[in-house]
Amino acid sequence: MKSTPLRPLFLNLILITTCLPLAAQMNSRNTPLDGPRPEIFSPATIKRADALIKQMTPEEKLAQLNQLFLFAADPKIDAAVTKGQVGSLLFVTDPTEINRLQHLAVENSRLHIPLIFGFDVIHGFRTIFPVPLAMASSWDPETVTRAQTVAAAEARSVGIDWAFAPMLDIARDPRWGRIMEGAGEDPYLGSAIARAQVRGFQGPAIGTPDHVLACMKHFAGYGAAEGGRDYDASYISDAQLHNVYLQPFHAAVEAGVGSVMSAYMDLNDVPATGNHMLQTEVLRDDWHFQGFVVSDADAVKSLEKHGFAKDPADAALRAFNAGVNMEMAIDQTAYSTLPAAFQAKQITLAQIDAAVKPILEAKIQLGLFEHPYNDVPHSQQVLNDPAHRTEALHAAERSAVLLRNENALLPLSKTAYKHIAVIGPVADNKHDTIGSWAFQEDANEAVTLLEGLRTKVGQSAKVDYAQGVQVKRLYPSFFDAIFKEPKEADWTADQAKSEYDKALSLARSADLVVLTLGEKQDMSGEAASRSSLDLPGEQQKLLEAVTALGKPTVLVLLNGRPLNITWASEHVPAILEAWYPGTQGGNAVANLLFGDVVPGGKLPLSWPRDVGQIPINYSHNLTQDYTAQAKRYWNEPSTPLYPFGYGLSYSTFAFSNLKVAEPQNKVGQPIHVTIDVENTGSVAADEVAQLYVHQQYGNASRPVRELKGFRRVNLAPHAKTTVDFTVTPADLSYWSPASRTWTEDASTFDLWSGNSSAAELHTTFTRTR
Ligand code: BGC
């Protein structure tokens, strides 16, 4: 958003005079608005696009702005591609079909412009990695980059040039099903994960071989849907928008992301897809974004439903004028009315040229003009590369979060247990291991938890399984048609009782129980919001009954959002959050449970005690005395069950010696912080050193804590290391609702470091002008 929107001149003058003291406090050199201008297309690409544009008719240019879904071969689409009436297709994944369509575009259309093929490559293509929320739990950008590098290589090998990822929506309401697709609640962690994903998808630059164009989405504010109801409107203050919701998007732009997807919902009563402030002022004017914006599916036509556009033609004009270059549509696009709008002089040639240019630049720089076709036999080799499965295993191991481990039940002894009961509805289902937003996986190769445990213990123990309960959505998912999970027939009441009893008697007969509870694949993701965070179905009853048997019991969670596990957190000795861990999930969990790998993941969100605490996030503001619990809720603590950044290990760590090199420093200068981390346990393990900052006073109230640095380190037993952080002036600046501009205050700051947002080791520093 421009800090000085259009307003009458006299008002500007008044503002200039009244805001002078505030303006003087700003340090414009270092505000996030003044990051590097990301040049994502080379001068040669730009020159070639300009030359191509000169040869194109207005109709040919406008045709490039159309993107259509293609689920199965369709003669209408063949004809449109042949006539050059489509710029892009999505959801075609068969390499032979992609080649066939590309031949039509390249050989038969007048200007031989190749199509760009897009697809939702969210957490893998054939090899499925943990879901994005899980990947963020690794607190390890390197692992994230490696995962998306594999995903990009697999997708590109079949001819997909463009991934509709990363999803960068900050979400603080776990009722929202899509919280699973993002990096959680925090803008700093979210930005780091955003950069890592862009690097993974695109490589060092757009056009790097075996990589794809990334598409950050959903711009912007989708994660704040009211009530957590998917697609509902978001109401976000300007300060929250700048300081929280836009941050990961800005980070991705600075990392060179090539495309953007507009969001579905209204942002403060203006639909994101018709929102000039978002799609032009923020993105292009403030951030200097050079790529292109595609709408979300049918989001242009929906402008009519919003009560914003009069009809499809009006919707097209509004989206186009807001800055949406390309329309994604399930069928006919509203943008097909743009040629008439041009004839009627409602849009100009200059606008059309500006809209088509970055699309052509992306196609050129991706090498589509030189290499429009994929090599089908080679794609099979890429998809079957065993190294990709190894990466998926590594990622799943690094993403799991150990929430509880009483009396060191974990790691499990490899010799003590002879009969293991694996119980629960998601323990032996390939799709529930993989999670939502995977369409091209080979489900057969996914390793369920039951399978992983069986492989791990081999002949040394008997592993038996009982599902116990059946869990289902009340309303079916519209994705059911696309997700290939065969639907289980509903159990009769008798069957339900007998399966439940079977599970309990299995637990009774075993000497170790691994309860695997959570959510089915279709319970998280798009159109998968819930009004409750309880374990779906009768899982809580099963949990309590099994735990009451008093056996050594481990609860493994497979899910896409924090669930209400407050009871379990008091009664079940060990809890491992595995999220939806992907193709290698079962092996990863088995390695973690038996201690061949030590958990090191941390929560990327605050874990609520129950749904009534939502929204809950650690970086809230402090008004009145927060430590007096009774001033918040009188029925339960107002703190989360587990804080942001929390996660246990099989080792223990000590933090000491928190030092700021410049305890007195100047606004505009960086700050150097060091902290010693020591592995005080007896196994080599990872710890995530985290740094939190709080500004004590200034131009506006600031959150009690904000993450401003983190590093995952591996330490041998008793080893100690010094972790250093640089806190930049941009890290300490924020968009102030008081001055309505980016501000860096002279102030005293608290600093904490440790292994969660509840870290206690504290010091301060002061910044003056
Ligand atoms: C989703 C997007 C996705 C698109 C294409 C939409 O429903 O909101 O995230 O990229 O479909 O599949």
Image: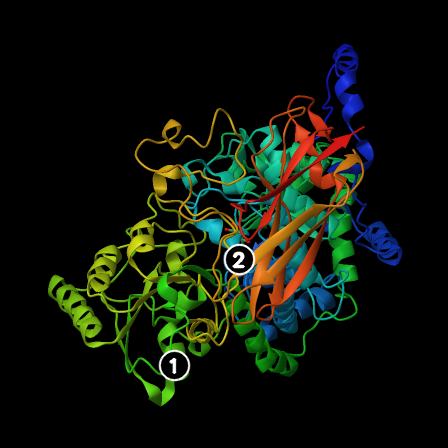
Query: Looking at this view, is 296 or 328 the one in front?
Result: 296
Q: Is residue 525 left or right of residue 12?
A: left
Q: Residues within 10 Å of mark 1 (few under 14, many from 20)?
A: some
Q: Is residue 132 visible?
A: yes
Q: Residue 703 lies in what quarter of the image?
A: top right
Q: Residues within 10 Å of mark 2 (few under 14, many from 20)?
A: many
Q: Secondary structure at mark 2?
A: helix
The percent coordinates of residue 734 (x first, y second) are 68, 33
Q: Is residue 83 visible?
A: no
Q: Which residue was labeled with disc 2?
A: 137
**How far, Cα to Cα, is label 2 from label 1?**
27 Å
The percent coordinates of residue 636 (x first, y second) are 33, 37
Q: Is residue 233 left or right of residue 733?
A: left
Q: Amino acid at mark 2?
A: Ser
Q: Is residue 747 left or right of residue 715?
A: right
Q: Which residue was labeled with disc 1?
A: 414
Residue 62 vertical position relative to residue 431 in the rendered view, above or below: above
Query: Looking at this view, is 310 or 197 the one in front?
Result: 197
Quarter of the picture containing the N terminus is: top right
Which residue lies most toward the left here?
A: 494
Q: Amino acid at mark 1?
A: Lys
The percent coordinates of residue 754 (x first, y second) are 57, 51
Rendering colour mode: rainbow
Q: Residue 766 lies in what quarter of the image?
A: top right
Q: Residue at x 35, y 58 (%)?
A: 519
Residue 1 vertical position relative to residue 171 in the rendered view, above or below: above
Q: Residue at x 54, y 38 (%)?
A: 619
Disc assigned to residue 36: none
Q: Secondary structure at mark 1?
A: loop
Mark 2 or 1 closer to N-term? 2
